[in-house]
Image: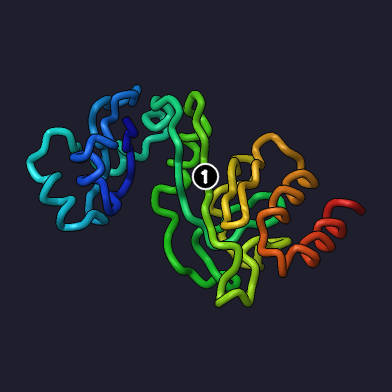
Amino acid sequence: DLGIYSEMGSPGYGTLTEKGIVTGKYKTFHPGKVTAAGFTGCTEEDLDIINNNPVFELYDAEYVLDIRNISKIDNFVAINNAISVDLTGQINAETGFGGRMINGHGGQPEMHTGAILSKGGRALTLLPSTALNGAVSRIVPELDQGAVVTVPRYFADYVVTEYGIAKLMGKDCRQRAEELVAVAHPDFRPELKQAAKKLFYP
């Protein structure tokens, strides 16, 4: 009985619906429907199921990404990726190595904020703990000069790596740093702890 309300399609939308895993039964906005601004990320198999199927709805991005609409869905869970997260919880999903643009923000700020405003909602930010084959940490003391903040720290909720879940909402900078160090790659935890002491324990 999962429900889908998304900017873009992903592989599995069609097959999960056909198998009865996605029903939208409990959606409080567009119940019983798979709602998206595009299904371009779906597989050919998915698109064969989606084509002319009244369960699947397309709306323009302005409607789908309207925070007021997203927040109407109780228990909405936003799932987004990030490039790096600093110890205060600032989320960068757009730039690497300073200001080098990798991609745009898309609908991430709206989906993330809508989830925060949803009754029972949660906003998950997913990222591997390292980049460049383990050479650098994606959990960083501070974002690089010129890096873009896609989601500000006061909206940061859950940050997930392969080492666990950092719960940030409602916590101060010291507590956030502790949470984030705990989900960083073990090789980088000592230097992140030292950076946190320097930044937040003057």
The residue lying at 48 percent from left, 69 percent from top is: 101
Three-letter code, disc 1: Leu
The residue lying at 59 percent from left, 41 percent from top is: 157
68, 76: nearer the viewer: 76
In the image, residue 40 sits, relative to residue 30, either above or below, namely: below
Identify the colour scheme used: rainbow
Residue 130 placement (x, y as % from top left) = 60, 68
Tell me where residue 36 sits by quadrant: top left
Residue 180 placement (x, y as % from top left) = 69, 52
Residue 197 placement (x, y as % from top left) = 86, 57
**Where the N terminus falls, by quadrant?**
top left
Q: In this figure, which residue is indicated by the disc labeled 1?
A: 124
- Looking at the image, the residue that sits furthest to the left is 52
The residue lying at 29 percent from left, 29 percent from top is: 24
- Looking at the image, the residue that sits furthest to the right is 202
120, 165: nearer the viewer: 165
Image position of 175 (left or right of 160): right
In the image, residue 174 sits, relative to residue 115, either above or below, namely: below
Q: Secondary structure at mark 1?
A: strand
| Label 1 neighbour load within 10 Å: few <14, some 14-19, many 20+ | many
Q: How many marks?
A: 1
Image position of 168 (left or right of 107): right
47, 70: nearer the viewer: 47
- Looking at the image, the residue that sits furthest to the front is 19
Image position of 134 (left or right of 5): right
Residue 60 placement (x, y as % from top left) = 24, 42
The residue lying at 27 percent from left, 27 percent from top is: 30
